[in-house]
Image: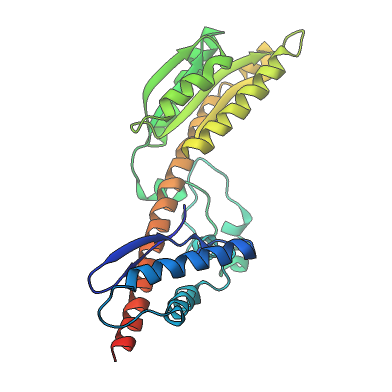
Amino acid sequence: PPRAAVLSSSHRTARIDCTALSCPLTCSCSLLLDLALMMMLSSLYSSSSSSSFSSARASSILRAARAPSAPASGRRFTRFFRSSAAAASVPSYRATFAHESSASSKWTETRIRHVGDEASSAGGTQPQLGVVIGEFHNDLMDRCLEDARVTAEQMNAKITEVVWVPGSYEAPLAATTLIARNDIDAVIILGYIEKGSTLHGQEMGATVSTLMKQIELQYEKPVGMGIIGPGATAEQAESRVGYAGNAVRAAVRMCSYLDQATAELEKMEQDEQAEMMKMIDEIDDDDDD
């Protein structure tokens, strides 16, 4: 989301979009947004009784606003990921990697995270999950659903609603209605696309997978894919019931990551707005003098 800055005079306040101050843009777009910002500043101060507003003053405020943002490209996420932090203890649901043991000394200046680890070590909130599951192969799906339920409990999450659909092809529509709700933090898709004599299953699997990823990005909520197949035989499906638990684990970890990332970005934006206000107040004081 674009960064917003608050510019205020002695008796008025304006909230403006400052995307140009933090996002890499083409030169022409940047110049246009600079001009728009200067026009906003001019309008903001035009009726001020303290002093007349000039383009030179607008330029000075614009330069002051840009000063902390060099280089602009990737600034927000560079700050987000590149702060030093001690590695958290490795949770039981994943393996230990080299950067957490023998090679840890090589990464002392880099923040490395495995999504969801912070919440698992600190307790965190309880994500509310919705499950969309196909009715085909009901015995197999019953076991997948139970695996999802047990895993959710282990991950401090809760399945609050289960929607059975005729098959995997109907899952995207049901998933959309669930993920759009405020009381659902993530959706888990469970199903089985078996091996057939035609390419129907492959087409179905590709369609469902693409649509579910689009839904995830549109609503910015995790979607855990626990569909077995396409092209899986009955024997292969029996040994892949654990896909359901894997889907739950992935979704819950992403929920924890998104919560923390959102909180950190909001904190950064608040700090940047405070810095902007301070610089503008200092410019006002200089003009009054």
Quarter of the image for residue 99 reads bottom right
| Residue located farthest toward the left when viewing the structure as drawn | 11
Query: Does residue 250 show up?
Result: no
Coordinates of residue 270 in the picture (x, y in percent):
35, 63
Residue occupying the point 57% across, 64% down: 30
54 vs 267: above or below: below
Instruction: Say left or right for 11 vs 164.
Output: left
Quarter of the image for residue 42 reads bottom left
Point out the image quarter for the C terminus: bottom left
Instruction: Say left or right for 171 vs 49.
Output: right
116 vs 33: above or below: above
Q: Nearer the viewer, residue 117 or 173?
A: 173
61 vs 218: above or below: below
Coordinates of residue 171 in the picture (x, y in percent):
52, 19
According to the image, what is the colour scheme of the structure? rainbow
Coordinates of residue 84 in the picture (x, y in percent):
50, 67
Residue occupying the point 63% across, 17% down: 237
Q: Nearer the viewer, residue 188 or 117?
A: 188
Query: Does residue 225 show up?
Result: yes
Residue occupying the point 61% across, 52% down: 97
Count up the numbered dots.
0
Coordinates of residue 161 in the picture (x, y in percent):
37, 21
Q: Nearer the viewer, residue 157 or 209?
A: 209
Quarter of the image for residue 287 reads bottom left
Q: Nearer the viewer, residue 157 or 3?
A: 3
